[in-house]
Amino acid sequence: MNLKTTLIIGAFALLSSNYSISQDLKHEIGIHGGGSLSAYLGYQASHTFDRANSGVFYGIGYQWNLKKHFSLRTEMNSERKGSIRQANGSPSSRTYTNLDYFTLPVFCQFHFGNRVQYFLQFGPYISGLSKAVERFPKTAGNNYQETINDVGYRYTQYEIGASLGTGIATYVSPHLKLFLECRYNQGITYLLHHSKHSNSSNMRNFSLTGLAGLHYCFGKKG
């Protein structure tokens, strides 16, 4: 048996061991992060030249593995939503709206596979608005000065929505799991105060998030 064959057999045995141990672990905690693209749905979004805004997404998570193919998962996340508006479609007149949230989702997750797992998860979330600003970049129309305005008074303080995510996970050691996920988030509650923006009060957030994470797995299933 040559060295190459020995290494392949050894690696296969290690992965098999990692998977068999990890299958019996009930709890997972970890970190995750990535980026997102967000925009608005509703009357105003369809009647203006809104474009998707980019932001950072990161947080911590806990997962409770109840069955072989079913888990419950919750997270505490910080994320940025919003949009980029162009008056008359002109790039030189862009307004950047940044909405910063703390978000608490709860997911039902179904996962399939052996050493490499594929998962699908869905569930509700609640978000609290921590900061809302409009940024006007340096342009001729703005006297080449950047302006930032606090616009938190326009927006509701809490948002309720639903998320749908899918991804892939693999065990890199008996107690460490690496995963990649793509997630769609849709606000259900309205974004703006009805009394202050009657013509656009049905606006809602939606975003698409790509993230990577690392979990520590522990606790034998009893």
Image (cartoon, grey):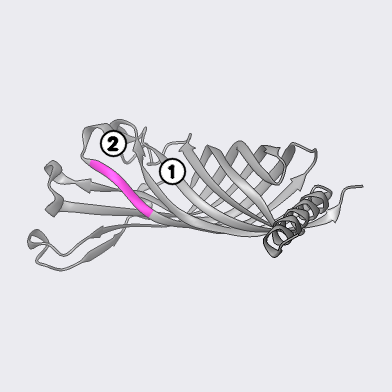
Location of residue 185 in the rendering, given as x and y in whole percent from the top left corner: 48, 40
Question: What secondary structure is found at the residue carrying circle 1?
Answer: strand
Q: Is residue 135 visible?
A: yes
Q: Is residue 102 left or right of residue 137?
A: right
Badge 1: few (under 14), some or many (20 or more) residues near its Cα, within 10 Å? some
According to the image, label 1 marks what residue?
A: 208
The kind of residue on which mark 2 rests is Ala
The kind of residue on which mark 1 rests is Leu
Q: Earlier in the sequence, mark 1 or mark 2?
A: 2
Q: Is residue 115 left or right of residue 154?
A: right
Q: Is residue 199 visible?
A: no
Mark number for residue 45?
2
* Foreground of the two, 118 or 13: 13
Which residue is painted at 28% across and 61% down in the image?
149
Q: In this view, does 138 lie to the left or right of 17?
A: left
Location of residue 117 in the rendering, given as x and y in whole percent from the top left corner: 66, 43
Which quarter of the figure is the N terminus placed in?
bottom right
Which residue is painted at 25% across and 42% down in the image?
50
Question: What secondary structure is found at the residue carrying circle 2?
Answer: helix
84, above or below 131, in the image: above
Rounded to the nearest whole Å, what is the CA distance between mark 1 and mark 2?
Answer: 17 Å
Q: Is residue 65 left or right of residue 203?
A: right
Q: Quadrant of residue 31?
A: bottom right
* Foreground of the two, 34 or 151: 34
186, above or below 17, in the image: above
Farthest residue toward the front?
1
